[in-house]
Amino acid sequence: MYAHPANATKSRLCRLNLDAVSQWRLNYFTRDQTASVVDYIFLINVNMMAFDAKYSNRCLDSFCADPLCSEIHAGRVSEEDRAKAFRRVINVIMNEAVRVRLVTREQKSAVRARLVKSVFSCEDRINAIREIAVLILLAQDERHRDFVQYALVNFGQTWAPSDASMTDVDEDCNLDPDMVYRKALGAINNTYLESILDVRRLGMSISVEEVAKLRELWARASTKVPTAAVVTLPMLLHLLVHCSESELQDALPQAGVSAAALAKTAGGSGLTGRIEQVEDAALQIVQNLGLAWELGDNPPRDLRQFCMVLLLDLGSVLSMLLVAETQPSDQPDSDQQEIGTVEDGLFARWWDVCDAVVTYERAHRHFYVAFLITYIKVASEKLLAQKADFNPELFLTMVVELLTEFRKRRPDYEAIVITADGRVAPSCLVDSGTASARSSGGDAASGGSVAKHGKALDRRTREDIGAEFDRLFAWVDQQLPVTNRVRALSRAQSPRSKTNSWQQAQSMPRSTSSASVGYGSATGGNRVASPVPPMPMPR
């Protein structure tokens, strides 16, 4: 359970704020007056580890004598200094795992040595730190202690599938035209899927003019046409199968053909080579995104690719919870008019959806769901970077837990209003109990805090969201059954078990501090719950 502030004053002095670390909101340490000495030691070494001379955060006091000053005092920071700082950071955070008896000191030393010798970039080091932090937070629930112990002891090791059938990836996989067409229809006007499956963003060298011609072909083949000027990958696959060669030659001229594609063409026709080039690129992207699991008749038994396609489907259903704020009048944006459209990374929408849902869940004190999404988000960074230590079994187990939590809410899903600048609307950050108390008979299930914005989730949408969660759960459960050795480590909750930490945290009073949203130092909700007594302070 979360430590109550009245009983956590002494223990707070020697504990690391794992909640702030998992969110990477380290400025909370400098603003929270109750930050522990361990928090400052952690921050000092993180600043050393992530030091960038172009964005210096050196201390302005030439004779600084403050032992808790987190700014840089050294004349220069070498790579060796960064590596040493990273080692100290791992030592600090693994000490929290030792404190709650998740690992032994020998296991802590083994994990620390493994990470120091295998993780070198600043981004990878930060991801490793955040993942360890959220794993320890998840261990507050007794059901996940064995699971977290396994994850921590094997942290940083190259994953090897426990099931021999998962390694069979050599069989041919043919795309099913009907599945491709249904996927194309499902992606239409789905802003999340369109942002990722847009052929213009997938590096296929398709020009704007070619997109316009492909949209014309799609309009002839289907009655459902996307409102945005976009052609998704499933739409392109459908056109490559059902359109004639002359139609494709007109839509895909020779302008973008590569020399390699021209050389492959037997008759020397650049037009046919261009079509082959686009087709080869499309099939390669299908494999990279794991879409063969969803579109093929014999999907490859590769759990990594299965996790990739889950990012598409899970992000899609979570994005259905997001509702754009209604603007009274659209004022022209001079910045956008002059700069134009600047695109982020391919999965930028995935990060935005995760951040919005985590912010909302924390504001409504659903910490368990927030921790699950945080873990899935951090682990997905290793998946997208194709890191060898990404463990699909750990990832899918947490996805199952998340889907289970959302299935329990069906059909009481509330809308998360997103403002024009991409933040969660303040009205959505009001606790549901407080909102219902202030409401004069509003429908809490459909999001009473959203009524003032004129948009809420109707019953049909909520039922569709629940059906998608059920579909994904059945799909993941089929690929990672309960007999899997890793998934079996997360035990089902017994009806006779005591109230878990998440329920107790929801009944605690909320903080009115502006230093954090949904949690605060006044609630004790940002501290790690320990099943063992706090260490005594030296007198």
Image (cartoon, rainbow, N blue to C red):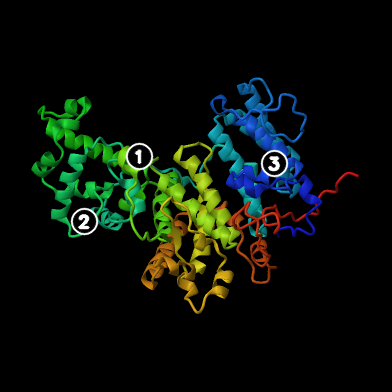
- Which residue occupies 32% across, 44% down? 286
Report the front residue among 248 and 481. 248
Say which residue label 2 marks.
225
Indicate the amino acid at tag 3.
Met
Dot 3: what SS?
helix
Say which residue label 3 marks.
94
Q: Left or right? Give the position of 253 relative to 278.
A: left
Mark 3 touches mark 2? (CB < 8 Å): no
Q: Say whether residue 482 is visible.
A: no
Q: Left or right? Give the position of 373 relative to 181.
A: right
Q: Is residue 304 above or below residue 400?
A: above
Q: Residues within 10 Å of mark 1 (few under 14, many from 20)?
A: few
The x, y position of residue 52, in whole percent, is 56, 27
Say which residue label 1 marks.
342
Dot 2: what SS?
loop
- Which residue occupies 39% across, 49% down? 309
Q: Which residue is the extreme one toward the right?
A: 539
Q: Residues within 10 Å of mark 2 (few under 14, many from 20)?
A: some
Q: Is residue 92 above or below residue 368?
A: above
The x, y position of residue 482, in whole percent, is 53, 59
The x, y position of residue 398, in whole percent, is 54, 54
